[in-house]
Image (tube, rainbow, N blue to C red):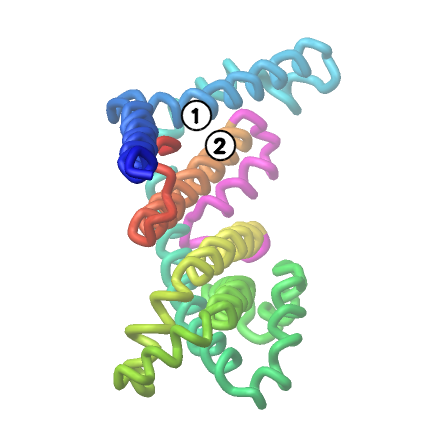
């Protein structure tokens, strides 16, 4: 009996030591910052290299004439000239301003609408399915109405960007609030949280991951709507990325057209990286980020 009693703590200590060893091993796998950066970068570089290689192979097959489908060398050479030109930065400034203003308005509308629908049953019954229907509606379908209401103007583009992004943000808020555990809400109320205080200190932090996912999806819809708007609504006195894409198509300038498309893709990747960093920070704060897998 005595030997059994003495042996039990020893086994427990061994188990704890084993868990500590696993934790230390996981920390060792994290490595240096440069190693983590390389581990996150090389798959993207490999995918980019594969895409460029396939592009070159298609060009070599002669499927299309070089004036319609130029090779990577020609396009990247033109991209180099485009990057140091004032046309790119003037157009990017106009497009970025439209994107920021439209997305900010969509976020404001989506947050208010999402919170209202999530917490008020009458609004849920009246607007719940309508928000999803609006989200699935192609942004390009709004442009005839936008042009009819606002003509070929900045307001027409702004109108479509907001309508394209706000439903995604609202749905993110609705799903986030729906999945807040009721026990957490009751605990907040028992601690004295009421009204805005309950939303600020209990519901909003708990729903934050879903809200960030909705914001990310909303940005994707806003960016797509903006690009479609700039292709359709060309304002002569204001250059933009979409307008320059239209001009390149009109003049059959395939290298410049593809260079602009690469710039649009790069902007999308940068914004996606920003949302990814925000998501990682939230998961780290919640303690659900695998430190060994960073």
- Quadrant location of the N terminus? top left
- The answer to which image quadrant residue 63 occupies is top right
Q: Residue at 29% across / 73% down in the picture?
A: 201
Instruction: Give the residue number, with chain letter if any, for mark 1.
Output: 79
Task: Tell me the crowding category of disc 2: few under 14, some 14 to 19, or many 20 or more residues within 10 angstroms, Cα based.
Answer: some
Q: Position of residue 256 (x, y in %)?
A: 51, 29
Q: Is residue 159 among what the camera can see?
A: no
How many angstroms separate mark 2 from mark 1 (CA)? 8 Å
Q: Residue 39 carries which label?
A: none
Instruction: Give the residue number, with chain letter if any, for mark 2.
Output: 262
Q: Are marks 2 and 1 in contact (CB under 8 Å)?
A: yes
Toward the viewer: 28 or 168? 28
Q: Position of residue 72 (x, y in %)?
A: 54, 17
Q: Residue at 37% across / 58% down in the picture?
A: 100
Q: Residue at 31% across / 47% down in the picture?
A: 284
- The answer to which image quadrant residue 121 occupies is bottom right
**Which residues are drawn in magenta?**
232-255
183 vs 150, left or right, is left
Toward the viewer: 15 or 58? 15
Indicate which disc, 2 or 1, sits on the residue closer to the N terminus: 1
Above or below for 136 versus 236: below
């Amino acid at each position: 009996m005595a030997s059994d009693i003495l042996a039990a703590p020893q086994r427990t200590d061994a188990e704890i030591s084993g868990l500590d060893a696993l934790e230390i091993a996981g920390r060792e796998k994290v490595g240096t910052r440069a190693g983590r950066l390389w581990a996150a970068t090389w798959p993207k570089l490999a995918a980019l290299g594969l895409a460029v290689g396939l592009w070159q192979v298609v060009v070599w097959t002669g499927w299309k004439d070089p004036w319609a489908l130029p090779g990577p060398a020609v396009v990247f050479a033109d991209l180099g000239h485009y990057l140091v030109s004032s046309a790119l930065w003037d157009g990017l400034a106009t497009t970025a301003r439209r994107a920021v203003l439209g997305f900010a308005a969509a976020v404001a509308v989506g947050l208010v609408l999402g919170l209202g629908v999530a917490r008020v049953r009458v609004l849920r019954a009246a607007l719940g399915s309508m928000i999803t229907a609006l989200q699935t509606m192609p942004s390009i379908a709004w442009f005839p109405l936008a042009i009819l209401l606002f003509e070929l103007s900045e307001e027409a583009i702004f109108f479509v960007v907001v309508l394209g992004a706000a439903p995604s943000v609202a749905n993110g808020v609705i799903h986030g609030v729906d999945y807040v555990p009721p026990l957490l809400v009751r605990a907040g109320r028992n601690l004295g949280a009421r009204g805005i205080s309950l939303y600020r200190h209990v519901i909003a932090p708990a729903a934050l991951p879903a809200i960030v996912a909705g914001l990310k999806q909303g940005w994707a819809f806003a960016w797509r709507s903006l690009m479609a708007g700039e292709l359709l609504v060309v304002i002569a006195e204001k250059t933009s990325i979409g307008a320059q894409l239209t001009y390149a198509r009109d003049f059959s300038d395939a290298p410049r057209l593809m260079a602009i498309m690469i710039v649009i893709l790069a902007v999308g990747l940068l914004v996606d990286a920003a949302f990814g960093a925000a998501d990682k920070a939230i998961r780290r704060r919640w303690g659900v980020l695998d430190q060994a897998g960073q």
